Image (cartoon, rainbow, N blue to C red):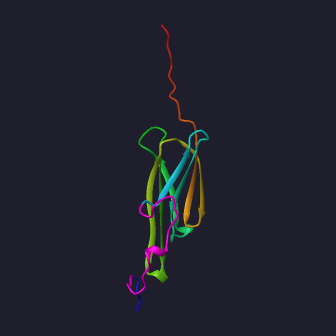
């Protein structure tokens, strides 16, 4: 018999800590440097294989915005569990380049911004 939630193997909260800048419930954090024109998005994908993670994007609802989606699912046979991630976020800035990096249970998305498009307006003087 396999026990996946057995009370005879307790974890004592007084003996463990987690030092992370985001909570497991949220699972993500970010930093934006508007002067240098980039953002880094950190997403907790612990338990999900790098090969199972897809990052997609599409145009957002407002001019120059981009909607990113991170999805992935991995079945861990030893744990009899499926680990997954599925979240979307909006970059309010136009993105010209996306770099993905996987490190220590995180996927780090580095977004380089391009300058927002300016509408071409013809000025007519009468």
Up-down: is 17 above or below 88? below
What secondary structure do most residues of the magenta stretch adopt? loop
Q: Is residue 52 magenta?
A: no
Up-down: is 61 above or below 54? above
Q: Is residue 16 magenta?
A: yes
Question: Which residue lies most toward the front here?
Answer: 14
The N terminus lies in quadrant: bottom left
Q: Residue 27: x percent and y percent?
A: 46, 61
Up-down: is 70 above or below 79? above
Residue sitting at x 51%, y 58%: 21
Count numbered badges in the picture.
0
Question: Which residue lies most toward the bottom here?
Answer: 1
- Front-lying residue, 111 or 7: 7
Residue sitting at x 45%, y 74%: 14
Q: Residue 36: x percent and y percent?
A: 62, 41
Q: Residue 70: x percent and y percent?
A: 48, 59
Corner quadrant of residue 7: bottom left
Residue sitting at x 52%, y 52%: 30
Magenta residues, as a range? 5-25
Residue sitting at x 60%, y 59%: 101
Up-down: is 101 above or below 97? below
Q: Residue 120: x percent and y percent?
A: 52, 26
């Amino acid at each position: 018999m396999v026990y996946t939630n057995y009370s005879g193997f307790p974890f004592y909260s007084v003996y463990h800590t987690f030092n992370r800048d985001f909570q497991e419930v949220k699972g993500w954090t970010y930093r934006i440097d508007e002067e240098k024109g980039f953002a880094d998005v950190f997403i907790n994908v612990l338990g999900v294989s790098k090969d199972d993670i897809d990052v997609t994007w599409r145009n957002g609802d407002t001019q120059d915005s981009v909607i990113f989606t991170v999805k992935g699912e991995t079945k861990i046979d030893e744990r009899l569990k499926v680990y997954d991630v599925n979240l979307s976020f909006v970059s309010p800035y136009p993105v010209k380049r996306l770099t993905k990096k996987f490190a220590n249970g995180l996927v780090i998305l580095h977004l380089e911004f391009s300058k927002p498009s300016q509408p071409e307006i013809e000025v007519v003087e009468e």
